[in-house]
Image (cartoon, coloured by chain):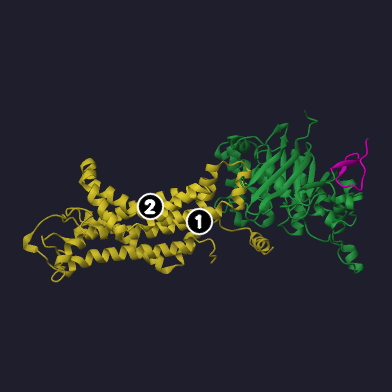
Chain colours: A yellow, B green
């Protein structure tokens, strides 16, 4: 057997060697993807700026100053001001927190639902699987944007009345975006489960007396997580875009909560004489989404067990 | 009670429902394993050995598989009607199982120590620390050098033979009374095979358990077994002590099997062709009436296809299912 001779050659290598956990191994491979490492660094800086920026750049986001309307970048206002004289840098920093929070939260919703549906479908044969996949296909075939608009129109006020307008919008946008992004994850997890549950080590664990739930949680799921992590990363970027789209259409957060998409929406009428207003939030979205996608690429290479480099 | 066999299969039938019809993979198998005894089940690919072994722990996929008839008595208790939760307690606590493929039978995302410890914790409720200590102890038991350090290694850091040792350590970690090993050496090269067989023998002596070894290699049989069960097309065709079987094989199929063992000593000096049994195993979808080996048998006669020969005791302790031999009443 080629496999066994190969393995014994490595096992009989000289004794002193470092213990390598799967995490370290993945990091070693991730580092080889230069663009991903640069992206990780850039995104790290960006997140850091969003976290500590508002503490350093203490200009309020809603201080109206009509003497300083629509100014271009200056030392006083590095990103310029909007039509009410509000500082755009402060608004971008503040809005980024919300945009990123929406992205991460929506990703968590999508991954949770996706893994749950995918795992149930993957473990059950026959009718349950067929029904869940039918549901997945149904969701995939729904026209996303019109439906989002409809849901938000219908429920924004009701939910806002219960948990407060800001939390209400946040919860709704996260639920709506996450609720429309779980399908690829579900399919991914289901496919992984189908192949993994026939693996010998699952059978072996069963022979050793592991229960069904134990098989799923301890043996199958961890082996299926690699592609899910990659999909989740890219989902964050997609959710940020989705939030921007909704906000740009005026259906996201209210004007007093400046997310990146909302800033673009406010800036669109003044593009001719104040391009800086749209430029900086747009750049922020662009950089965030681009770096997240590169990181996803790097993770895919790092977590793919078939790539041995 | 102690005289009763540890494991006794009576008329076990396992059928698989496929699109083409019922596959009678195991069609009436009787088999006993006594305490501290090694029993080998031999036969060529597709004769139902593995299905028999897996069925004992109910590891076959049901559906499409189904235990149609028979009973599996372990210490007198029939396992066939047991619910899944009860079967879980028997697996590895009472009956350990070692698979054929050591390369893929370990979960790649956990260290081997974690995997052994998991089994121990589950069945014996040990603490995490105690379970890891037990794991290291088990690795030492199966002669893995430097066990304290190796418990923290991942499966890919082990060679095939070492992984099979780990699998055996896992199967033995809860002190089962019976170890079922399904072709444990098939995927390994010859020198490692010998080591693993030796290890199994050693474990058996030290822990006093019984072993049911599934194999297709007659060499393995000669080296390990006390009693041998020869299977053909889902049925037992011959059962004897290992000495009787090799000295005086009765069933034409067993004779063929023994004749087809390659002999290095003869091959080097004379240019004889390796003997093989002509033909292939009949389809288990529609097994032929009468003796299933008749189509390939050099002694076949008209009576062979008339009715199925029952498994009869021809000399004390030696059972054969062939009409060549009249039953002796001791």
Residue at the image point whose x is 24% and y is 42% from the top? A163
Q: Is residue B112 left or right of residue A239?
A: right
Farthest-out residue, top = B1
Foreground residue among A155 and B13: B13
Residues at discs 2 and 1 both on one chain:
yes
Query: Quadrant of the rendered structure where residue B86 is?
Result: top right
Q: Residues within 10 Å of mark 1 (few under 14, many from 20)?
A: some
Out of B180 and A51, give the one closest to the viewer: B180
The magenta span reads: B310-329
Q: Earlier in the sequence, mark 2 or mark 1?
A: 2
Q: Name the residue rendered at 79%, 43% in the picture.
A: B38
| Local SS, label 2 | helix
Disc 2: which residue: A110
Q: Secondary structure at mark 1?
A: helix
Q: Position of residue B7 (x, y in %)?
A: 75, 37
Magenta run includes residue B255: no
The reply to whether residue A171 is visible in this rendering is yes
In the image, residue B134 above or below residue A106: above
**Quadrant in the picture for the N terminus of chain A:** bottom right
Q: Nearer the viewer, mark 2 or mark 1?
A: 1
- Residue A191, numbered circle: 1
């Amino acid at each position: 057997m080629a496999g066994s001779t190969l393995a014994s050659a490595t096992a009989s290598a000289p004794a002193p060697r470092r213990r390598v956990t799967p995490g370290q191994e993945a990091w070693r491979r991730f580092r080889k993807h230069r663009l991903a490492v640069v992206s990780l660094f850039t995104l790290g800086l960006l997140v850091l700026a969003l976290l500590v920026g508002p503490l350093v750049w203490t200009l309020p986001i809603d201080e109206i100053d009509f003497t300083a309307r629509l100014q271009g970048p200056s030392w006083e206002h590095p990103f310029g001001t909007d039509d009410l004289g509000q500082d755009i840098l402060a608004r971008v920093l503040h809005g980024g927190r919300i945009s990123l929070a929406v992205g991460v939260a929506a990703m968590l919703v999508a991954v949770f639902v996706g893994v749950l549906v995918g795992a149930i479908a993957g473990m059950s044969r026959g009718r349950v699987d067929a029904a869940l996949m039918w549901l997945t296909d149904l969701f995939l075939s729904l026209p996303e944007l019109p439906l989002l608009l409809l849901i938000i129109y219908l429920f924004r006020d009701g939910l806002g009345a219960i948990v407060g307008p800001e939390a209400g919008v946040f919860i709704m946008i996260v639920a709506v975006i996450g609720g429309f992004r779980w399908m690829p994850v579900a399919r991914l997890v289901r496919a992984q489960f189908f192949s993994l549950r026939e693996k010998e080590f699952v059978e072996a664990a069963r022979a050793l007396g592991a229960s069904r739930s134990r098989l799923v949680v301890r043996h199958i799921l961890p082996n299926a997580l690699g592609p899910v992590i990659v999909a989740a990363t890219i989902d964050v970027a997609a959710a940020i875009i989705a939030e921007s789209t909704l906000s740009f259409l005026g259906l996201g957060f209210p004007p007093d909560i400046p997310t990146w998409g909302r800033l673009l929406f406010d800036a669109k009428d003044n593009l001719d004489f104040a391009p800086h207003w749209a430029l900086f939030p747009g750049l922020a979205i662009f950089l965030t989404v681009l770096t997240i996608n590169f990181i996803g690429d790097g993770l895919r290479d790092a977590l793919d067990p078939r790539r041995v480099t | 009670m102690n005289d009763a066999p540890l494991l006794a299969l009576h008329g076990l039938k396992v059928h698989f429902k496929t699109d083409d019809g019922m596959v009678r993979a195991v069609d009436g198998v009787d088999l006993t394993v006594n305490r501290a005894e090694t029993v080998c089940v031999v036969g060529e690919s597709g004769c139902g050995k593995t299905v028999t072994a897996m069925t004992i722990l109910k590891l076959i996929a049901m559906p499409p598989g189904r235990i149609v008839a028979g009973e599996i008595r372990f210490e007198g208790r029939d396992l066939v009607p047991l619910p899944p939760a009860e079967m879980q307690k028997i697996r590895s606590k009472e009956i350990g199982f070692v698979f054929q493929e050591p390369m893929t039978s370990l979960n790649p995302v956990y260290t081997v120590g974690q995997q052994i410890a998991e089994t121990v914790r589950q069945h014996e409720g040990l603490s995490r620390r105690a379970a890891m200590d037990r794991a290291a102890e088990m690795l030492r038991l199966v002669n893995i050098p430097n066990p304290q350090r190796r418990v923290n290694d991942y499966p890919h850091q082990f060679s095939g033979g070492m992984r099979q040792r780990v699998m055996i350590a896992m199967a033995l970690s809860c002190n089962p009374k019976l170890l079922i090993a399904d072709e444990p050496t098939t995927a390994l090269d010859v020198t490692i095979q010998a080591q693993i067989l030796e290890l199994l023998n050693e474990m058996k002596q030290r822990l006093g358990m019984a072993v049911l070894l599934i194999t297709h290699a007659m060499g393995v049989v000669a080296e390990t077994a006390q009693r041998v069960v020869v299977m053909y097309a889902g049925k037992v065709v011959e059962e004897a002590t290992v000495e009787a079987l090799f000295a005086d094989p009765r069933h034409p199929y067993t004779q063929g099997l023994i004749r087809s063992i390659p002999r290095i000593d003869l091959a080097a000096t004379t240019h004889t062709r390796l003997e093989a049994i002509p033909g292939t195993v009949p389809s288990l979808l529609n097994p032929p009436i009468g003796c299933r080996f008749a189509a390939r048998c050099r002694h076949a006669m008209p009576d062979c296809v008339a009715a199925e020969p029952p498994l009869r005791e021809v000399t004390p302790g030696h059972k054969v299912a062939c009409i060549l031999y009249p039953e002796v009443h001791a």
